[in-house]
Amino acid sequence: MNVVLASKDFLAGTLYMAFGLLGLWLGRDLESGTTGSMGAGYFPRLVCALLIAIGAVLAMLSLMRAGERLERGKWRPFVFVTLSCLAFALLLHPLGLVLTLALTTVLARLADGNVRAIPLLLLCTLLIVINVGIFVVGLRIAIALWPAGL
């Protein structure tokens, strides 16, 4: 494979464009509306268009200069970040936002392997406070903070 086509920037740009195109295709049936009267598909189309544009710029820039070669894949980050996302999706309703955020933050942090207790506790606390502040207090989304039994 050509060195340019195997650079991190080129592959990331291609991935951004692929996600943008996939999003446009998945949202093809949504009504977009106008700027003054936005439909359900307006913002997703805008985000997908931005993804495609950023991906194209990134890929083109990578063709003009030598970038970092892609390193060999590591399974640990992939597995733990994926588990963290799945845990959030599956545990939010039964455990509530606070415990789910704590658990998923710990899982995601295990992707590195170098976990220290105090920084992890601070990260969990900060993420819980920010998320509760934004979603429960600020946006008033009805999300249970704790399990139903507590």
Image: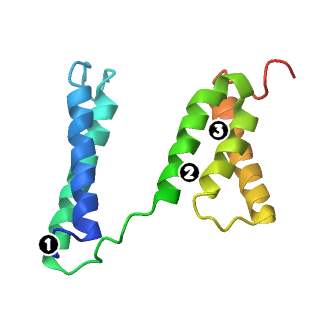
The answer to the question of whether label 2 and label 3 lie on touching residues, with beta carbons closer than 8 A, is no
Q: Is residue 23 visible?
A: yes
Quick one: which residue is furthest to the bottom in this view? 66
Would you call the spot at circle 2 few (<14 residues within 10 Å), some (14-19), or many (20 or more)? many
Q: Which image quadrant: the N terminus?
A: bottom left
For numbered disc 3, what is the local secondary structure? helix
The residue carrying mark 3 is 134
User: Identity of the amino acid at label 3?
Assistant: Ile
User: CA–CA distance between discs 3 and 1?
Assistant: 40 Å
Give the percent coordinates (x, y) of residue 55.
Answer: 23, 56
Looking at the image, is mark 3 or mark 1 nearer the viewer? Answer: 1
Q: Is residue 67 above or below residue 101?
A: below
Residue at image x 28%, y 60%? 12
Q: Position of residue 123 (x, y in %)?
A: 71, 56
Q: Which amino acid does label 2 sit on?
A: Phe
- Residue 105 sits above or below residue 115 on the image: above
Disc 1 residue type? Leu
Badge 1 or badge 2: first in the primary sequence? 1
Q: Which residue is drawn at 31% across and 20% down?
A: 39
Looking at the image, residue 125 sits to the left or right of residue 64; the answer is: right
Q: Residue at x 69, y 30 (%)?
A: 136
> Which label sits on residue 63?
1
Disc 2 or 3, which lies upstream in sequence?
Answer: 2
